[in-house]
């Protein structure tokens, strides 16, 4: 019984609320810039997925509800001195597994 309760707790934590942030990024000039920013964002605890596009100079990041967006901006800065600006943060639609 304890094992079942433990599994249920783990599932409820992993299925917590998610948000999606759209971030404008200044300073990117080549495809390698996008790779660096994406890797840095994906290494941030609480980030599930990151997409970075050079042509729009924007990142779309799916992350845990309780992650402070300042952590996302720090990851962008750490990738090579790029500057990020949060454009929007919205609740994520539930994912089908």
Image: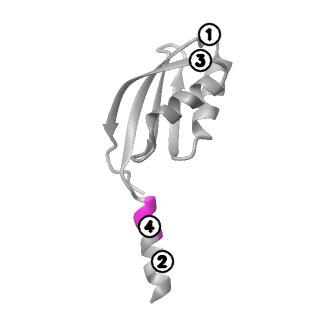
Q: Tally the numbered discs.
A: 4
> Are there few (<14), some (14-19), or many (20+) residues within 10 Å of tag 2?
few
- Which residue bears the numbered disc 3? 82
Specify the segment rendered in magenta. Answer: 10-14
Compute the Cα span from label 4 to label 3. 36 Å
On-image quarter of the N terminus: bottom left
Secondary structure, mark 1, is loop
Taking the magenta stretch, the answer to whether it contains residue 11 is yes
In primary-sequence order, the first of circles 3 and 2 is 2
Which mark, by number, is residue 6?
Answer: 2
Q: Position of residue 46 (x, y in %)?
A: 51, 47
Q: Which residue is mark 1?
A: 29
Secondary structure, mark 3, is: loop
Q: Residue at x 40, y 65 (%)?
A: 12
The local crowd at label 1, few if under 14, some if 14 to 19, many if 20 or more residues have their Cα within 10 Å, is few
Residue 22 in the magenta stretch? The answer is no
Residue 77 figure quarter: top right
| Residue holding disc 4 | 11
Looking at the rendered structure, the secondary structure element under dot 2 is helix
Please tell me whether mark 4 sits on a helix, a strand or a loop: helix
Where 10 falls versus 25 (above or below)?
Answer: below
Distance from Cα at disc 2 to Cα at disc 1: 47 Å
Lower position in the chain sequence, tag 4 or tag 3: 4
CA gap, disc 3 and disc 1: 10 Å
Camera-near label (2 vs 1) is: 2
Q: Residues within 10 Å of mark 4 (few under 14, many from 20)?
A: few
Which residue occupies 36% across, 51% down? 17
Q: CA distance from mark 3 to mark 2?
A: 42 Å
Distance CA(mark 2)–CA(mark 4): 9 Å
């Amino acid at each position: 019984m304890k094992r079942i309760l433990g599994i249920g707790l783990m599932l409820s934590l992993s299925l917590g609320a998610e948000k999606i942030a759209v971030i404008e990024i200044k300073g990117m000039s080549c495809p390698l810039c996008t790779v660096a920013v994406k890797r840095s964002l994906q290494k941030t605890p609480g980030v599930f997925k990151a997409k970075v596009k050079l042509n729009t100079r924007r990142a779309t990041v799916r992350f845990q509800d309780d992650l402070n967006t300042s952590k996302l901006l720090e990851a962008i800065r750490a990738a090579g001195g790029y500057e990020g600006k949060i454009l929007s943060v919205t609740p994520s639609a539930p994912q089908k597994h």
